[in-house]
Image (spheres, grey):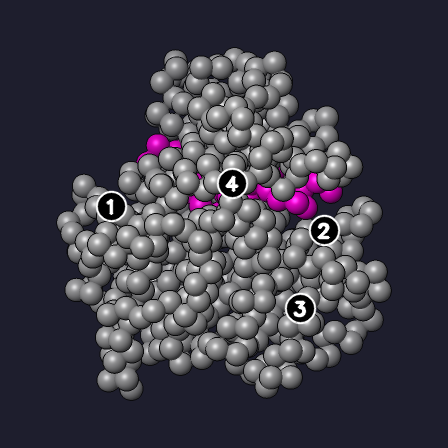
């Protein structure tokens, strides 16, 4: 068995052609010379197997002991408060929105106090979604406005507006419904050289009883700089919130390149070009980690489907297909709606065993929502049922299992992937960040997650503990699941699942 495993790793370390080429990134032709500088083959088998990722994305060595895994929403909130109250020169926040409750106000107040203490030395950047951040009279914009009014030279608030919401569509879609078209969905919380990456937004539920995933990476200056540059670049083609409450395009962005007025393709080309300069594979060596001695590497992955950036889905698809027989893949998402490419590989091409965790309808954040949104839990039930029945028809239901997260009084929003290689006890790779592995994540929203690859046994063990905590609240799906009365899908929801599934 050990000889078989070693042959698999030796085969993978020399590199193979990517089985699926869905990326349109222009830099693909010149990554080979850059990637040669990141040699992982001298490291243990886990690092060698995943070394191909550095030909697609930047690679950052980190210390395993600098990676902390949080398990509770309250820990996430406490970390935000603690880091915001001790930051020295920069706070960079990228989220879908900022809530309007007392916990969110306390977080903003913590940032304000720190800015006052440092007397202009602390620079603060917020990147939020334009539609979600503007919803209602009291919203993300009004929450941050006092901070911006008080220190306009030290605070930047940017609101990303999707290029797909324009013309008649922009005129007729009301608030909340206009968010279906496309969003800024990246979740990054950066304090000096510390990053908190998560799928969680900044609102009360995510601080109390909405389960997500949260990883803190400390003392990672190069990785932090990468993400700061990415956020600032997106800010450049977003609207800027002014102290008087109005918005305008960033001064560095061409005024004739508007997100919803003018030439759509011109905007896409300019934005795509700017993002690709940042995310192309490069050699980044930490000043404090000698070359080729790190046991842990981080690969940031970016997806902006509307801007023709497909880095994250390319790596995810390759991970699913490259995993050898005997691999265990745990894939979690709060919203189960796998794109066709993902389903095809999982059910027809991959030889790994899959354990999929998604939200039970009672753990869906849209449960009992008013209006059409109240049908969303049933919609995801239908999509899960379709996938399950397809796996049964292909006789793959024993290799591909689905579980539903249930915890009374809680909702589930966790997403990510843990990959355990043949013969290994613990996962050596995890994906964590904002993507839900759904059609929205691939085609519509701005997303980012990181691939953490490690041969450090202590970190591997902690990743397994995190995974097991989440899956410990999972209940296996079987044929009887979808025949129960409480799982029947209304006809109108069924129709939406057939014609509009790519919006979810």
Report how far apart the C-alphas of labels 4 and 3 lie in the structure.
Answer: 33 Å
Viewer-nearest of discs 1 and 2: 1
Instruction: Classify mark 2: helix, strand or loop.
Output: loop
Depth check, front residue: 250 or 73:
250
Residue 195 seen by the camera: no
Q: Which residues are magenta?
A: 176-203
205 in relation to 5, above or below: above
Indicate whether residue 434 is drawn in magenta.
no
Report how far apart the C-alphas of labels 1 and 4 lie in the structure.
Answer: 28 Å
Instruction: Classify mark 1: helix, strand or loop.
Output: loop
* Rendered image: mark on residue 284: 1
Report how far apart the C-alphas of labels 4 and 2 lie in the structure.
Answer: 32 Å
Depth check, front residue: 197 or 133:
133
* Rendered image: mark on residue 268: 4
Instruction: Classify mark 4: helix, strand or loop.
Output: helix
Q: Name the N-terminal-most of marks 4 and 3.
A: 4
Q: Which residue is mark 3?
A: 384
Viewer-nearest of discs 1 and 3: 1
Left or right of 25: which side holds 160? right
- Residue 209 is situated, as x and y percent measured from the top left of the image, at 62, 48
Please tell me which residue is depicted at 54% across the width and 40% down the height of the picture. 265
Report how far apart the C-alphas of labels 2 and 3 lie in the structure.
Answer: 16 Å
- Residue 259 is situated, as x and y percent measured from the top left of the image, at 58, 33
Please tell me which residue is depicted at 34% across the width and 54% down the height of the picture. 28
- Residue 364 is situated, as x and y percent measured from the top left of the image, at 68, 55
Left or right of 345: which side holds 246? right
Q: Which residue is mark 2?
A: 366
Viewer-nearest of discs 4 and 2: 4
Q: Name the N-terminal-most of marks 4 and 2.
A: 4
């Amino acid at each position: 068995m050990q000889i078989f495993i070693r042959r698999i790793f030796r085969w993978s370390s020399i590199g193979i052609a990517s089985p699926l080429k869905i990326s349109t990134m222009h830099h693909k032709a010149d990554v080979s010379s850059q990637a040669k500088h990141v040699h992982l083959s001298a490291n243990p088998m886990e690092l060698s197997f995943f070394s191909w990722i550095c030909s697609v994305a930047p690679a950052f060595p980190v210390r395993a002991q600098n990676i902390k895994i949080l398990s509770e929403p309250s820990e996430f909130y406490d970390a935000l408060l603690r880091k915001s109250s001790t930051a020295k020169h920069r706070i960079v926040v990228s989220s879908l929105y900022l809530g309007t409750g007392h916990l969110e106000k306390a977080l903003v107040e913590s940032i304000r106090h720190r800015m006052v203490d440092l007397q202009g030395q602390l620079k603060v950047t917020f990147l939020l979604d334009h539609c979600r951040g503007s919803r209602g009279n009291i919203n993300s914009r009004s929450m941050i406005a006092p901070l911006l009014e008080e220190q306009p030279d030290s605070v930047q608030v940017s609101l990303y507006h999707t290029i797909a919401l324009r013309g008649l569509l922009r005129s007729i879609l009301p608030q909340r419904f206009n968010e279906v078209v496309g969003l800024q969905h990246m979740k990054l919380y950066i304090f000096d050289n510390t990053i908190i990456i998560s799928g969680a937004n900044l609102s009360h539920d995510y601080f109390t009883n909405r389960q997500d995933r949260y990883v803190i990476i400390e003392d990672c200056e190069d990785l932090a700089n990468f993400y700061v540059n990415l956020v600032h670049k997106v800010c450049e083609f977003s609207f800027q919130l002014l102290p008087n409450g109005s918005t305008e395009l960033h001064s560095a962005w061409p005024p004739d390149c508007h997100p919803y007025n003018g030439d759509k393709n011109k905007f896409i080309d300019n934005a795509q070009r700017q993002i690709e300069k940042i995310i192309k594979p490069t050699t980044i060596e930490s000043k404090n980690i000698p070359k080729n001695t790190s046991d842990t590497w981080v690969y940031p992955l970016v997806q902006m489907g509307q801007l023709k950036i497909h880095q994250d889905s390319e790596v995810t698809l390759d991970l699913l297909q490259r995993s050898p027989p005997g691999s265990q893949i745990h894939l979690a998402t709060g919203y189960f709606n796998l794109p066709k490419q993902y389903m095809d590989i999982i059910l027809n091409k991959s030889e790994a065993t899959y354990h999929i965790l998604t939200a039970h309808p009672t753990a869906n954040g849209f449960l009992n929502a008013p209006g059409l949104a109240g049908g969303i839990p049933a919609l995801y039930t239908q999509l899960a049922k379709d996938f399950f029945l397809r796996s049964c028809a292909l006789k793959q239901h024993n290799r591909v299992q689905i579980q539903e997260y249930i915890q009374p009084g809680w909702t589930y929003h966790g997403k990510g992937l843990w990959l355990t290689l043949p013969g290994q006890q613990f996962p050596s790779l995890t994906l964590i960040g904002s993507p839900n592995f759904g059609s929205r994540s691939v085609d519509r929203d701005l997303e980012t997650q990181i691939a953490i690859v490690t041969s450090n046994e202590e970190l591997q063990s902690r990743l397994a503990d995190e995974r097991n905590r989440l899956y410990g609240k999972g209940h296996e799906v079987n044929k009887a699941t979808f025949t129960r009365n409480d799982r029947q899908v209304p006809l109108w929801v069924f129709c939406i699942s057939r014609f509009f599934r790519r919006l979810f």
